[in-house]
Amino acid sequence: MNYSTSEENYIKSIYHLRGDHQLVTTNELAAELKTRPASVTDMLKKLKAKKLLIYERYQGFKLSPEGKKVALGIIRRHRLWEYFLSVKLQFSWDEVHEVAEELEHVTSKKLIDKLDEYLGFPQYDPHGDPIPDQQGKIHAVKQVVLSEWPLMELAEVSGVTDQRSDMLDILKHQNISIGTKLEVKKRFSFDNSVEIKTKNSPAFIISEQVAKNIWVKKPGT
Amino acid sequence: MNYSTSEENYIKSIYHLRGDHQLVTTNELAAELKTRPASVTDMLKKLKAKKLLIYERYQGFKLSPEGKKVALGIIRRHRLWEYFLSVKLQFSWDEVHEVAEELEHVTSKKLIDKLDEYLGFPQYDPHGDPIPDQQGKIHAVKQVVLSEWPLMELAEVSGVTDQRSDMLDILKHQNISIGTKLEVKKRFSFDNSVEIKTKNSPAFIISEQVAKNIWVKKPGT
DNA sequence: AAAAATATTTAGGTAAATCTAAAAAAAATA
DNA sequence: TATTTTTTTTAGATTTACCTAAATATTTTT
């Protein structure tokens, strides 16, 4: 019921590569973990013995239901700490991951559930990835800031980071609100402004600053 | 400049046993760490090679100045996390230590300094132990709640936990404030109330509840 | 100060997690 | 399908942090 840091890292990486659907290969996992295939094989045997992995030699492998549960527990810890670092300690978006990689291996259940409560049961980490609940269930889907959304792919607005009134002003002015469906028509490399098209209005341009504060996801998810 | 969890635990234990003044013995440290003397000897060699320890075989050992600095860094992390767990996550007094034992090994300097700032640069952890600053300097001395102070030993009031007015009322009524010097004359086992004597007034009794909220330290420290 | 008791260290071994080099299996290609 | 290439596994080392048992220092007692 308690796993070493190393075991946890393997489980987490397997989940990140394929969830629990398709098979993962030894080389792939070795690359992901920056280790050697032979080391991976060793650990696979160990994880199989602990029934966290479905694995037959030379056949690839994936997480067992139990393994998936463990993975989601680790991911829960990781994302809660990322949220904490970002919101409470003012870490920037790109600094949180590295520190959370260490904090996630502190396994006290009480610590994590209390932290969750203290943070107000956040739905998303600072990268827009959903945070699993105490049972390991994920309720939301990945969201991304509009400034990173691919061109010509329908998106649905799921949230806004900066709630200041001048920010909300712009959204109101352009008739954007939670649930609005839109597409990014063009991204201008000069200032990273983006041209947006919604159903019932002509295309218009918003600045990178604004686009960075609008969260979007695949429509209807 | 970066030490394993095991190395950190040895350093911390040596500091807890003797600071950096007197010599520590192998058996003593083995008992403290619940390990075998032979294992201690192994680690002593390693720490000596890293110049954290002053050690000649069969002669006992103590931390070098560098070793002391490392120890104080670990203690700083430990105590800040204890404070966090207690104040922010509502852990009780006796639950904080175990979890802090794990959190203390996450070594990001930025994490700890930001956490310190976020907590408002606390002076004491929940057990009354002073928290070293960024340079590893300890500014305060250990304080203890009055309910735990030994009988017949002069104490100076250094703080009050519960700041509610009915609590402060009692203190005012008994003429107790920060800096007041007092002695515990008797502790009644029935209800753990204590008889207090200050210089300019006759002895009086306060309840355990009150005694638990008054912090005291050695006078003049 | 010699013997006995205690403390410490050395020698040699184990488990976890890594590695390299070689062998074996699977997949791709000619 | 036979050969070559790639992937995966096995075999055998290495490092860290432990361990036990035996040897050696030191300390205490007689």
Image: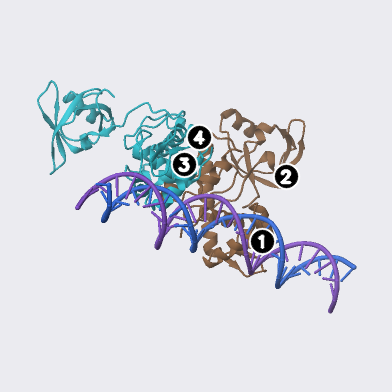
Chain colours: A cyan, B brown, C purple, D blue
Q: Residue B35 location, x and y as percent? A: 64, 54
Label 2 chain ID: B
Kind of element beneath mark 3: loop
Mark on residue A213? none
Check the image and report above or below for A181 versus B71: above
Of the image marks 3 and 4, the number of the one nearer the N terminus:
4
State left or right for residue A40 relative to residue B86. left
Of the image marks 1 and 2, the number of the one nearer the N terminus:
1
Rounded to the nearest angstrom, the CA distance separating label 3 from label 4 is 12 Å
What amino acid is found at the position of numbered circle 2 in the picture? Answer: Pro
* Front of the two marks 4 and 2: 4
What amino acid is found at the position of numbered circle 3 in the picture? Answer: Leu
* Residue behind mark 3: B119
What amino acid is found at the position of numbered circle 4 in the picture? Answer: Leu
Mark on residue B150? 2
Is residue B46 visible from the viewing direction of this image? yes
* Residue behind mark 1: B26
